[in-house]
């Protein structure tokens, strides 16, 4: 295998061996703590612009299973301790290294990913490069920008997904980088889903006469999506709305709130969140680098969920507006599905039942 280097914007260098596609790459270096679910991670559009570090030391042992893909691979790079060359799983179709190469993802293995994660937890996420030689000048790495993240992953044209079984509801889903499992979770609940581009206007959404609007996950800094925020502001209170991840953040901004970049984000399938109504804690799947400041929506929204590790806001209810949002992923592929009942709450809202 060819020698490769992971070079951090702070000057630290981690040597390793090349995997995946040839060439070099620059992006924002983040880590995810998932023990399983590397396929869902690599195909989650919310990772657009990021070099993903897997903290679990062995990756690729169950190969590549296309039916588990969540969307188009949008990552900038991939970092692992050990890449399994000979996967063993009856569903596997080929090895992960081939997937990375075919997707054009530059990767590196042989890196002490746990030592790397300690750096990111101490100093915060930062830009990095995977390259053949260590550059003398790090200015290009340090100045690399993530721009137009949502536009790069959102669908270009609208399309429909039929309900499974009898159709009872019609959901307009605005795609900021949606995971397929969100669409499937709605379809299983008797919903026909119309998936719309991020550039759709509020008037166009309402013209479809949907029973509810779903605001999806997605990548990047939520505050950059000025147009999308304005359209959400026009939708709130006119139709039931459920937002997840980036959709949660955009809704808060639409309602006058603020967001902040977390030091190293929440990424993985083991994030604990507490439901404030009863103090019960659930384990959730998450992938985000920003959080809503709960106090910034006081008087408009009520914080409903809170991260049990760092106390950051994980959910907001908007009383009297038929709207609620959560930071985590209730569809949770891969990860625990303990909070799937939130889709049932959205379904009940569309059926005219009181929003508890």
Image (cartoon, rainbow, N blue to C red):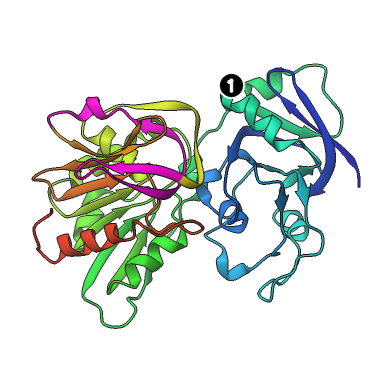
Where is residue 347? Give x, y as percent.
21, 64
Does residue 161 sit above or below 118 in this rendering?
Answer: below
Quarter-of-image position of residue 240: bottom left
Q: Residue at x 68, y 42 (%)?
A: 77
Quarter-of-image position of residue 4: top right
Where is residue 56? Give x, y as percent.
66, 46
Quarter-of-image position of residue 124: top right
Asked if the magenta segment contains residue 288, the reply would be yes
Q: Residue at x 8, y 57 (%)?
A: 354
Q: How many numbered dots are placed on residues in this image? A: 1
Where is residue 34? Give x, y as percent.
57, 49
Does residue 278 sit above or below 133 in this rendering?
Answer: below
Considering the whole magenta stretch, tell me its main secondary structure: strand
Q: Residue at x 34, y 79 (%)?
A: 164
Decide if residue 129 is in sight here: yes
Asked if the magenta segment contains residue 67, the reply would be no
Query: Is residue 1 found left or right of 25 in the rendered image?
Result: right
Query: Is residue 147 found left or right of 248 in the rendered image?
Result: right
Q: Nearer the viewer, residue 258 or 37?
A: 37
Query: Is residue 131 found left or right of 117 in the rendered image?
Result: right
Residues rendered magenta in the picture: 271-299
Where is residue 18? Give x, y as percent.
83, 44
Secondary structure of the residue carrying numbered label 1 = helix
Decide if residue 21 is in sight here: no
Q: Residue at x 57, y 43 (%)?
A: 33
Residue at label 1?
A: 122
């Amino acid at each position: 295998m060819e020698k490769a280097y992971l070079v951090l914007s702070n000057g630290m260098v981690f040597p390793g061996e090349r995997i995946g596609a040839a060439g070099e790459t620059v992006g924002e270096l983040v880590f995810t703590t998932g023990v399983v679910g590397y396929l869902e991670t690599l195909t989650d559009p919310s990772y657009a612009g990021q070099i993903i570090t897997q903290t679990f030391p062995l990756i690729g042992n169950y190969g590549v299973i296309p039916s588990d893909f969540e969307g188009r691979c949008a990552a900038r790079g991939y970092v692992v301790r050990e890449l399994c060359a000979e996967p063993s799983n009856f569903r596997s179709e080929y090895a992960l290294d081939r997937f990375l190469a075919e997707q054009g993802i530059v990767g590196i293995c042989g890196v002490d990913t746990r030592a790397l994660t300690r750096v990111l937890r101490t100093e915060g996420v930062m830009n990095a490069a995977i390259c053949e030689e260590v550059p003398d000048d790090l200015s290009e790495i340090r100045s690399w920008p993530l721009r137009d993240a949502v536009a790069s992953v959102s669908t270009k044209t609208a399309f429909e997904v039929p309900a499974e079984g009898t159709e009872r509801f019609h959901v307009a889903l605005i795609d900021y980088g949606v995971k397929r499992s969100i669409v499937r979770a709605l379809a299983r609940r008797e919903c026909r889903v119309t998936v719309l581009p991020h550039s759709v206007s509020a008037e166009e959404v309402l013209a479809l006469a949907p029973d509810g609007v779903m605001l999806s996950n997605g990548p990047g800094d939520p505050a950059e999506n000025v147009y999308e925020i304005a359209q959400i502001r026009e939708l709130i209170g006119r139709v039931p709305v459920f937002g997840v991840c980036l959709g949660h953040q955009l809704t808060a901004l639409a309602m006058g709130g603020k967001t902040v970049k977390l030091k190293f984000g929440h990424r993985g399938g083991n994030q604990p969140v507490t439901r404030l109504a009863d103090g019960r804690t659930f384990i959730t799947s998450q992938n985000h680098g920003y959080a809503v400041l709960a106090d910034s929506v006081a008087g408009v929204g009520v914080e409903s969920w809170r991260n049990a590790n760092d106390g950051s806001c994980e959910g907001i209810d908007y009383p009297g507006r038929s709207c609620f949002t959560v930071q985590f992923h209730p569809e949770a592929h891969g990860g625990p599905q303990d909070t799937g009942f939130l889709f049932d709450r959205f379904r009940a809202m569309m059926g005219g039942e009181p929003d508890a």
